[in-house]
Image (cartoon, rainbow, N blue to C red):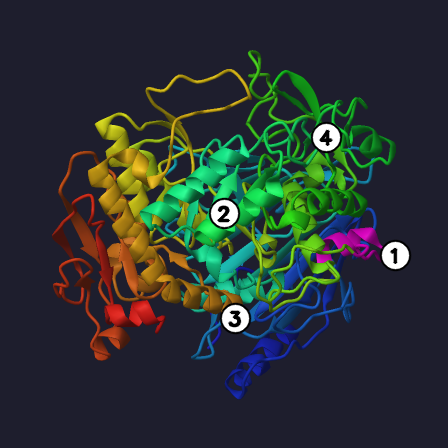
Amino acid sequence: MLLKFGHICTAAATLFILVAVTNASEGYFQPNSTGIKIQNGFERVYVQPFGKHGIRVRASIMRDPTGNEWSTLMDPPIEGPGGNAGLSHDTTISYMSNATIRNGNIVAQVSLGTISFFRIEPNDSLTLLTSEFTDTKARVPRSYVQNFVSNSFEATFDFTSDADEQFYGAGQQACCKDNSVNKKGQVVDLINWNSHVTMPVYMSNKGYLQFFNMGAQGRLEFGTIRTRYAASEASVVDYWITAAQPGDYDALQQQFTGVTGRQPIPPDFILGYQQSKLRYWNQSQVVDVAQRFHDEQVNVSMIVIDFFNWKFQGDWSFDPEFWPDPASMVNQVKELTGAELMVSLWPSVEDLSANYMDLQTKGLLATTRDGTGITDSFEGVYTRLIDSSNPDAREFLWKQLNDSYFSIGIKNFWIDQADGGTLGEPFENNGQTINLLPYVRAFTQYFSGTQESTGKFYPWFHQQAIDEGFQNLTDFSSNSNSSDVSLSSISTVDNPMSLAITERSFTPFRTCSQMSLTRSTFIGGQRFCSYLWSGDTDSRFEVLLQQVTAGVSVAASGISSWTLDIGGFAGLNIDTDEGKELFVRWFGMGVFLPFMRVHGTRTCNLTRTSTPPHANPCPNEPWSYGEENFVILKKYIALRYQIIPYIKKLFEMLHKTGKTIMRPLYYDFTLSDPFVVNATKANDPDVVHEFMLGPRLLVAPVGEQGVTTKEVYLPVLPQNLVDQGFSWTHWWSEQDMGTGGRFVNVSAGLDEIPVFFLGTKEDIFNGNI
């Protein structure tokens, strides 16, 4: 049967949908049309099939889109139809006309100029997912304001939503007060800064995902009956929508990553324990730390060298005063521990840098509207940003990294401060006395466009600089351990805009031999050999729990390759009982994250020196938190290495299908447990502060000081898992807790983070899922 539409269908449109529905059981319904063009006076709107069960909509004013606008969609997509179609269409209608297009299980209907989206159900009925919002006296759902000094415009696009609808994703919320998983009722600012990595994408519990394929600053407004996307500056409004059955969030993610790219499989070593602090400031410290790990017989997979390993910002090389022979350091660390090294790089360039004049004369630095190019200051000097949206700038950066680091065996890079516009804080004059100026970004101009129109892309380009570099090394392969490498020229094509986004050298399915760590990203960043961390968080118990909601929200946005600073970034005193307890609690959670990474600037009873900058002597290694705690931390590290086969399997699944790794409870229990649904709607801490690591492990971190037990909610298992004989089992006691639907009180000592598994431990240890 046909459900009533929000608008009157024409007889032709109704007939088409009826015919389409009758073919639903014959397999995937291939698009019946290449696309629809709506010619509405000065407005042009293209509606086209793209990807599996997906529809892409592009709208512009005064002129047609070019088809070469900035985009993070892969064309052709990994899966589904619509590739290499450009702006092709076989139907052109005026504002008052009607048309319908179907791709798979999603239908887009245009009725009197308004677009609505429907899902075709297994019983051949239609369900309205969302439509452009209209009312008797409402503003038009597609609204534009143009400043005629350019072709760009502001835009707001409005869509209907149900009063009780839930929305998930929208990227990573900023530290440290937002504990939401359901974003309904929120306004999400689309701008990058430290820990604030919002993204214009969301999933609905009604069974659809909507993504605005744009790098513009702006906002998402999740109102009671209307959802609004607002862009500060655009030349085209470009969005994509897909549908699945309610509760099947893995299908939505598979379809979404099928058009935006899949995470390559990370190298085995990076799934182990990563040691970092702010900061090891000379090579003897790094070697000493490696020696201690060797002597204590504690596994470590990576040791990180943080910022200001350089002399001047923009050098992208070691300061020889403190790093006289880094090649020998690399070899010593490898011999002692087998660990890889990672080195920090910033995008900032100061006048005294050896690279400043070359970058400036070649036009490879971002500029500003006033022409000075100054975007921020740090350590008492003004800085500019390398313009990584420019392919030539990315090539320049990689050559410096290759010469300074990769050529001596350091192949992992930490992309810090690269949030775009400034050095990444939500204010100007980073680190200076006067910084709370009444604007959060310099008016930066990039090769790609303005900060307002493409600023969200900036960290994405920076990630791409590293990935492009590795893919263009002439004699580098994932099986090679040689540090004697050469660099080929990074390829270019006639249209550099298309190159930067579609990535001609990108391989959809591959294994990484290295990884870059980034503080910000954008949709599509998952297809680089890169992982995101949650930025500079506060070291507090409540923030430990807040990070769960941040992690699952970014995972619901297509970015599963995620981690955090174990212990929080700032505010932890290692000489206090509270600081030690907090670190151990956070450490226990870190065992069960996609990546296990310790980092932070610690306080302690040792006296700081004034030089070199940020030379914090306070330790942050496992043995730094007391002998009793060291025993616990060694136990947790050993457990991490035991479950690596399971984590590796999760990344393989992510790589093949986009299946989310760090999973909010609504992912797996929406259809079996009404309590999870209602608690998620209310952002109840009893539910949103728990998560699943893959399909077999439930993790309930402890976020209170001084407790020894914890009440944990165990969701009702779906019937198919019950039929397989699965039940919740407490990790530490191995007590069978039943099939869920109740709170259980379990021991929660420092050495026993509440964790529950399905199946057997042997399945986990062997990577059998």
Which amino acid type is marked by label 1? Asp
User: x and y percent of residue 643 in the render?
Assistant: 34, 62
Which amino acid type is marked by label 2? Val
Q: Residues within 10 Å of mark 4 (few under 14, many from 20)?
A: many
Q: CA distance from mark 3 to mark 2?
A: 34 Å
Figure quadrant of residue 739: bottom left
Q: Which residue is labeled 2 in the image?
A: 333
Q: Which residue is labeled 4 in the image?
A: 444
Q: CA distance from mark 1 to mark 2?
A: 44 Å
Badge 2 marks a residue whose secondary structure is helix
Q: Residues within 10 Å of mark 2 (few under 14, many from 20)?
A: many
Q: Which residues are magenta?
A: 488-502
Figure quadrant of residue 633: top left
Q: Is residue 305 visible?
A: yes
Q: Which of the marked residues, 2 or 4, is nearer the chain's N terminus?
A: 2
Q: Residue at x 14, y 66 (%)?
A: 738
Q: Which of the marked residues, 4 or 3, is nearer the chain's N terminus?
A: 4
* Labelled disc at residue 494: 1
1 and 2 marks in contact (CB < 8 Å) = no
Q: Which of the marked residues, 3 or 1, is nearer the chain's N terminus?
A: 1
Which amino acid type is marked by label 4? Thr
Q: Which residue is labeled 3 in the image?
A: 656
3 and 1 marks in contact (CB < 8 Å) = no
